[in-house]
């Protein structure tokens, strides 16, 4: 799958009722011998800032899972763990430079933990206008990171 196809697939998944973490992680999972359905199951609790707690953005946590899947090695735990952490920092810093934060609440600008906030987010189409962009941005950063190393 090409970079462009992965980005298009991530958006298609996000629009098709999968959360941001699932949409990001599952498009990279096959590269690491993880079935897409398993990736979506693993990432299911990370959407909306981890279980709708609006903590770390689900697209970012999906990216972090992809980094771990790519770089962690049981044959070199200390070395691969250091590489994973380095790449995670790169992902987070690049995302923060572009968006100012990785916190879902601040990124979305609505408290979706309440019925009123969720209604506001849906009415203002925040998931389409903002979250789709975060999914694309994380995928773009991953594409760059994976090409560099």
Image (cartoon, rainbow, N blue to C red):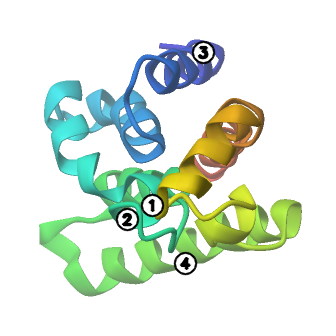
- In the image, 124 versus 22, the foreground residue is 124
Q: Which residue is mark 2?
A: 50
Q: Nearer the viewer, mark 3 or mark 4?
A: 3
Q: Does label 2 or label 4 sit earlier along the sequence?
A: 2
Give the class, few, some or many, for how many residues have Cα within 10 Å of label 1's Cα (few <14, many ≥20).
many
* Residue extending furthest toward the front: 116
Q: Which residue is mark 4?
A: 86
For the residues labelled 3 and 1, the Cα–Cα distance comes to 19 Å
Tag shown at residue 61: 1
Q: Nearer the viewer, mark 2 or mark 3?
A: 2
Residue under the point 86% across and 69% down: 97
Q: Position of residue 29 (x, y in %)?
A: 30, 35
Secondary-structure class at tag 2 = helix
Q: Quadrant of residue 28?
A: top left
- Establish if 75 lies above or below 19: below
Q: Are marks 1 and 2 in contact (CB under 8 Å)?
A: yes
Q: Does label 3 or label 4 sit earlier along the sequence?
A: 3
Q: Nearer the viewer, mark 2 or mark 4?
A: 2
Residue under the point 70% across and 33% down: 123
Q: Does label 2 or label 3 sit earlier along the sequence?
A: 3
Q: Which residue is mark 3?
A: 8
Residue under the point 41% across and 28% down: 27
Secondary-structure class at tag 3 = helix
Q: Position of residue 140 (x, y in %)?
A: 69, 39
Q: Is residue 51 left or right of residue 57?
A: left
For the residues labelled 1 and 2, the Cα–Cα distance comes to 9 Å
């Amino acid at each position: 799958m090409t970079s462009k196809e992965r980005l298009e697939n991530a958006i298609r998944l996000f629009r098709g009722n999968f959360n941001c973490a699932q949409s990001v992680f599952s498009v990279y999972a096959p590269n690491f011998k993880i079935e897409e359905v398993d990736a979506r199951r693993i990432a299911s609790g990370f959407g909306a800032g981890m279980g709708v707690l609006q903590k770390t953005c689900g697209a970012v946590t999906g990216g972090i899972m992809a980094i771990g899947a790519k770089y962690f090695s049981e044959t070199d735990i200390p070395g691969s763990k250091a590489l994973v952490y380095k790449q995670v920092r790169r992902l987070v810093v690049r995302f923060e430079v572009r968006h100012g934060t990785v916190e879902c609440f601040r990124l979305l600008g609505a408290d979706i933990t309440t019925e009123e906030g969720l209604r506001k987010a849906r009415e203002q189409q925040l998931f389409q206008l903002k979250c789709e962009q975060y999914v694309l941005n994380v995928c773009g950063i991953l594409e760059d990171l994976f090409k560099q190393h």
